[in-house]
Amino acid sequence: MDNQTERKWYQKPVTVVLFLILFFPAGLYLMWKNELWSKTSRIVVSVFFGLLVLGNINKANETNSNFSNSSNENRTITFDEAKQFMRTRLSNVNQTLMASKTVVFDGKKVYMFMSVAEDGSTCISGVSEFRLEVMSTDCGNTEMKIQEWNNL
């Protein structure tokens, strides 16, 4: 009898391949236990499936992150939350918060912040009431930025 007919159903290459595709961990176990292919082939297949698993874990984390972000989209950001966010952000880039105010643009609140950098330049940044992130920042000459600030 040849080697193929002596094997049980779960030891045959076709079954192991099907288990690798449909029942990944069991297929990997059968592939290593039955030693159907060379060690190099088994290592390549194991690395391939390992990368697939890691890729899917990363996608799952991104999906969960997107879901949690989307569930918070209906919540509006308060002025105090935006101000604390900007204080933290500005301290990370060695800037000092000098002034803050709320501006209504097209019926939506935009929280505006004026900061000064260590080099003396002045920046005006905006944070939307819908998302806790900087929408824009414009830095330049202090006199010009104070004029722009007063015109907001």
Image (cartoon, rainbow, N blue to C red):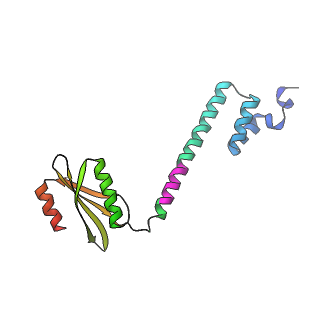
Identify the magenta region: 59-68
Q: Residue at x 64, y 25 (%)?
A: 40
**Image position of 20 (left or right of 53):** right
* Residue 85 in the image, given as x and y percentages of width and height: 34, 57
Image quarter hosting the N terminus: top right
* Residue 52 in the image, given as x and y percentages of width and height: 58, 41
* Residue 81 in the image, given as x and y percentages of width and height: 36, 63
Q: Residue at x 33, y 65 (%)?
A: 80
Whether 103 is drawn above or below 119: the answer is: below
Whether 3 is drawn above or below 76: the answer is: above
Q: Residue at x 31, y 48 (%)?
A: 92
**89 or 25, which is in the foreground?**
89
Please identify the quarter of the rendering in which residue 149 is found. Answer: bottom left
**105 or 4, which is in the foreground?**
105
Q: Residue at x 56, y 46 (%)?
A: 57
Please identify the residue farthest to the left as the structure is shown: 143
**Image position of 27 (left or right of 111):** right
Image quarter hosting the C terminus: bottom left
**144 or 87, which is in the foreground?**
87
Whether 83 is drawn above or below 91: the answer is: below
Magenta segment includes 60: yes
**Image position of 109 (left or right of 76):** left
* Residue 110 in the image, given as x and y percentages of width and height: 29, 66
Whether 44 is drawn above or below 52: the answer is: above
Please identify the residue farthest to the right as the structure is shown: 1
Magenta segment includes 115: no
Q: Main secondary structure of the magenta part?
A: helix
